[in-house]
Amino acid sequence: MVTKNIVILIFLLGIYTQGSGQRAVKKIDLGNGVSIEMVAVAPGKFMMGSTLKEKIWATGWEGGAEPGAGLPGTGVRESYEGEAKLVHVKEAFWIGRTEVTVGEFRRFVEETGYITDAERPGGETQVFDANWKTKGTWPPYPWVSMKGKSWRDPNFGFLLRDSYPVVCVSYNDDKAFCEWLTKKERAAGRLPEGLVYRLPTEAEWEYACRGGQEGSTYFWWGNDLSEGEGRLNISGMDILPGRNKAWPYNKVPWSDGFAFVSPVDFYGEKGRNGFGLADMLGNVWEFVLDDFDPSGGHEKAYLGKDGKVVHNVCKGGNYYDVPGNARCAVRLGIKSTSYSDSRDGFRICLGVPVVNGQ
């Protein structure tokens, strides 16, 4: 899509005006002292998906993802990543420095009275099972679908501060937040016609995640897992509240400081990628705009065969994930657009509207 509106072009080309090498940054005022920081991302190219070598690592002893038929590199989840391919992102966009926080989402609810899918009659959300017990060496799945829980109380067993990423919000909820912000900014005269706040497309998200890495690396900093220490929140040597054990399955051999969610941007400069974006891997899964195609991600927006998203995609891994499930290429299809989970959140994008195949 070629941007024709000159106002939009100037608005987006703020990305290129800084000669210092620093990326353009803007803060979106949500009121009551709450703001969202956005970072400019120029067009570019990257390798989308993963190589067979990466899939083998992800399902091997260090990555810890579950392989299919017991063979490394044959996991069903890894097959969803597709083969690594060169993809071009042709439009500039802005993306949130961090995942949307509890405090930012609260401002949306305060202004609109919005009720999330989990809070509606009959609603429920996937949360940590406080009664979960290990049995021998192979524990049961420590998550359960529960009514009465939501972004206000995700059943972590501790109070969520405003600086934590919001969780237990669905694709529908995320889109409603973006629509509210678009309307709010346009009414204030701060957003030209032809630009919208929305979820990033899958290609935009993975491009942003890789942070300028053009090669097919496992993580945004490269292929060496040990270099991830002090950069991200995934399954590590962190004791679960009220227990004397950490998460089961493979984990990184260090403590990242959190058994559950961490405050956004907690790791500072070391936790930011080449574009200056924080928590692109780990902390919480991030929903993107696209519908799920099990053959791999798309260069252009894929909003379903009939233009209707049924199983939206999430990216990036979360605080519970093994290392092999917290890579740039990992992608999952979500049960439905009303599904929510205490491991899932979102990050917003500012750019031109997208339609299927553009």
Image: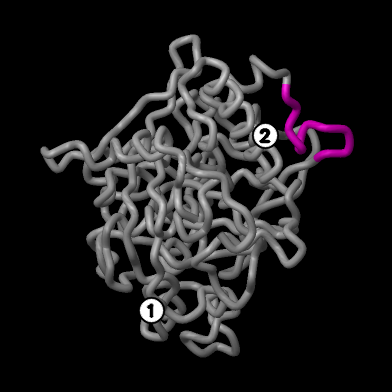
Q: Looking at the image, what colour scheme do you see?
A: one colour
Task: Give the magenta part as a residue range.
Answer: 114-123
Report crowding for label 2: few under 14, some 14 to 19, many 20 or more residues within 10 A (C-alpha).
some
Q: Do the residues labelled 2 and 1 touch (CB within 8 Å)?
A: no
Between circles 2 and 1, the one closer to the viewer is: 2
Q: Position of residue 286 (x, y in %)?
A: 53, 49
Q: Name the amino acid type tagged 2.
A: Ala
Residue occupying image coordinates x 45% and y 47% = 3
Residue extending farthest top:
32
On the picture, is 330 further left or further right than 128?
Answer: left
Q: For mark 2, what is the residue?
A: 176
The residue under the point 45% across, 55% down is 204
Q: In which quarter of the image is the C terminus?
A: bottom right
Disc 1: which residue: 54
Image coords of residue 213 (percent x, y): 27, 63
Asked if residue 117 lies in the magenta stretch, the reply is yes
Residue 5 shows up from this direction: yes
Q: Which of 176 and 167 is in front in this view?
A: 176
Q: How many labels does the image show?
A: 2
